[in-house]
Image (tube, coloured by chain):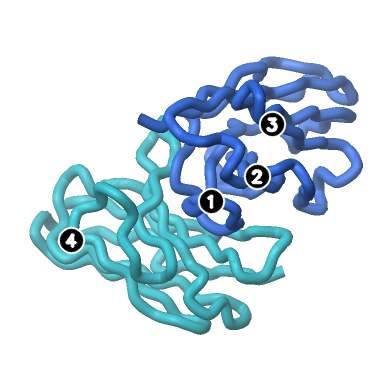
Amino acid sequence: QVQLVESGGGVVQPGRSLRLSCVSSGFTFSSYGMHWVRQAPGKGLEWVAVIWYDGSNENYVDSVKGRFTISRDNSKNALYLQMNSLRAEDTAVYYCARDVAPAAIGSFEYWGQGTPVTVSS
Amino acid sequence: EIVLTQSPATLSVSPGERGTLSCRASQSVSSNLAWYQQKPGQAPRLLIYGASTRATGIPARFSGSGSGTEFTLTISSLQSEDSAIYYCQQYVNWPPLTFGGGTKVEIK
């Protein structure tokens, strides 16, 4: 069955960096677009970033452009989110998620369990 | 950016009743709309995509309808396990992919 397992979250001071990882299994990772979606405490869902199935393209929500970088290693079935210059407003649970269809960007069929990130001094 | 507005904010219904949740888009998204269910402490679960296609393993009591700017998620006969927050999401005009603010469904 499809599994997505995130790791790398934690408590970090403002301005510092953190790298999240998401390891997948149960499907052909290299065929699917992959996303990061976050949820601040008590708030709704916010899409953060997407990377194409082959890593050829990536997009970000404006609030993280220039600070966050999404990447993937298809040989390791792994997705990453490098988060630099972290701010208090980046505090959230971060989920990795897989697109419904191969080579398409749309809705999120599978989600990881989430990894919490707290930015605080 | 396409803004999705969900209503009502909270829906309180008795078991066995029908629940109707709405999602309105600030501009047309055609049928590029999905619905998710999220229970406390859990990741969201995809219910509907393409406005009306049920995701794998989703019970038939969940149905989606609409196109353009007006969408509805209907839960035909609410059960206690349907207590959750429901979000809509558009994927026609991005970045960014956007979500609605959510509707909380409470079972009386």
Disc sitting over residue A91 in the figure? 3
Distance between the alpha carbons at the discs numbered 4 and 1? 27 Å
Distance between the alpha carbons at the discs numbered 4 and 2? 33 Å
- Pointers 2 and 1 in contact (C-beta within 8 Å): yes
Lateral position of residue A78 relative to residue A3, left or right: right
Which residue is label 4 attached to? B61
Foreground residue among A50 and A45? A50
- Pointers 4 and 2 in contact (C-beta within 8 Å): no
Residue at the image position 47 percent from the left and 61 percent from the top: B88
- Pointers 3 and 2 in contact (C-beta within 8 Å): no
Report the amino acid beneath label 3. Answer: Thr
Disc 4 is placed on an element classified as: loop
Please rate how many residues cluster around mark 1, counting C-alpha atoms within 10 Å: few if below 14, some from 14 to 19, many from 20: some
Residue at the image position 54 percent from the left and 40 percent from the top: A97
Q: Give me the chain letter of mark 4.
A: B
Q: Which is more foreground, mark 4 or mark 1? A: 1
